[in-house]
Amino acid sequence: MPLRKKNPLLSPGKGLLGDLPPPSNISYLGNFGSLLGLCLPMQIETGGFLSMHYWAKVGLVFASGGHIMRDVNYGFLLKYFHANGASLFFLCLYFHMGRSLYYGGYLKGPVGRVGIVIFLLTMATAFLGYVLPWGQMSFWGATVITNLLSAIPYVGTDVVQWVWGGFSVSGATLTRFFSLHFLFPFILAILVVVHLIFLHIEGSNSPVGSKTPVDDVVFHVYYTSKDWYGIVVTLMLLSIVVYLMPNLLGDPENFIQANSLVTPVHIQPEWYFLFAYAILRSIPNKFGGVVSMFLSILILFFFPLLHRSWLIKGVALSSIWTYGFLIFCCEFCSSYLNRVFGRRRAFYNNRAAGCAILFFLLSYINSFVGGSGNNLLFKQRKKCDL
């Protein structure tokens, strides 16, 4: 008997993953789930080692970054793998969520809801980590984003000061952000286990929308071999970025120590937050922009309610959703141009926000079309019965 079956430590993992019965027609887009399982432990390990040499004091924090780069053995690799690993994490996360939207994975209720909570917690963790280097963009990014809480009626200012631990972003803010950034990945790991448990109960969704288990296969070794191939290719690409162009996705402003008296010309987030930044900047009203930004993510909770068709299981089998989804993906990618072409920022802000609204309007249209299709199907069945 193999060790994974009789070992009391390995057998639960085998029951959770090894015996998972996925459909046999899952493409390489399914690899991004396993790649996320690679990224999270890598981020926890590199972040743990970095925390051993990090000084969460305003006067020392920026110098600790230089200390890690120059004095710690292989500290530069830890820092670059952690920083670029965050971008890899979000890249895999967006592909994983895109596949779920395209093939109807959101119809697996508990799996989708836990996945959205994981996404929200990942965004919070990434924001907290972006503040820790204490460069110019980190400091002013923290100031701008935390100030969004002041849009809450009546208590907004008090909430902002409570988050800051004072009347501005200071040492108290840095300390609590560091503590939360260290804690959240472990909560993420627990949520990932819950996500896998629900996935084991609900089962993986088939790209063709089939629910019958006739064509199901065992996860190991049919998909573990495919996942290993994706892991090797991904690690090679990540190594190329880390060793040859480690600051490709960083901001030059973050090489300057935080100064509360000097504001950067353009305060902008990392690329994986640009969609939210574009929505926020495209709406002149502060409260409206904040609400729209949060609703752009929270609306994912309502996708199962919008899907009313009995026949069509996913975007791939609906022409209306397919066109809207492709437009949304193209404009989501073009939000990166908001960072590259600063002179036309308002133009790309409005395009990104407008196409996000277009996608969600198409989803509402599709819900009514799906309901009409259900009524037509029900009438035809009723005629056949008569």
Image (spheres, helix red, strand yellow):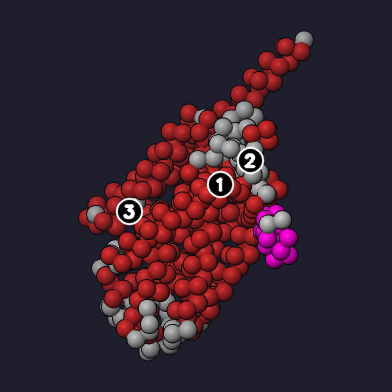
The answer to the question of whether label 1 and label 2 lie on touching residues, with beta carbons closer than 8 A, is yes
- Is residue 125 inside the magenta stretch? no
Q: What residue is rendered at 46% in x and 66% in y?
A: 126
Local crowd size for mark 2, using a 10 Å CA cut-off: few (<14), some (14–19), many (≥20): some
Residue where numbered disc 3 is placed: 336
Of 290 and 196, which appears nearest the observer? 196
Q: CA distance from mark 1 to mark 2?
A: 9 Å
Q: Secondary structure at mark 3?
A: loop
Q: Is residue 361 above or below residue 38?
A: above
Q: What residue is rendered at 43% in x and 33% in y?
A: 323
Local crowd size for mark 1, using a 10 Å CA cut-off: few (<14), some (14–19), many (≥20): many
Q: Secondary structure at mark 2?
A: loop
Which numbered marker is on residue 223?
1
Q: Quadrant of residue 273?
A: bottom left
Q: Please, what is the three-letter code of the amino acid marked with disc 3? A: Tyr
Q: Report the mark closest to the observer, 3 or 2.
A: 2
Q: Secondary structure at mark 1?
A: loop
Q: Please, what is the three-letter code of the amino acid marked with disc 2? A: Val
Of 216 and 333, which appears nearest the observer? 216
Q: Is residue 68 visible in the rendered structure shown here?
A: yes
Q: Is residue 51 above or below residue 118?
A: below
Q: Report the mark closest to the observer, 1 or 3.
A: 1
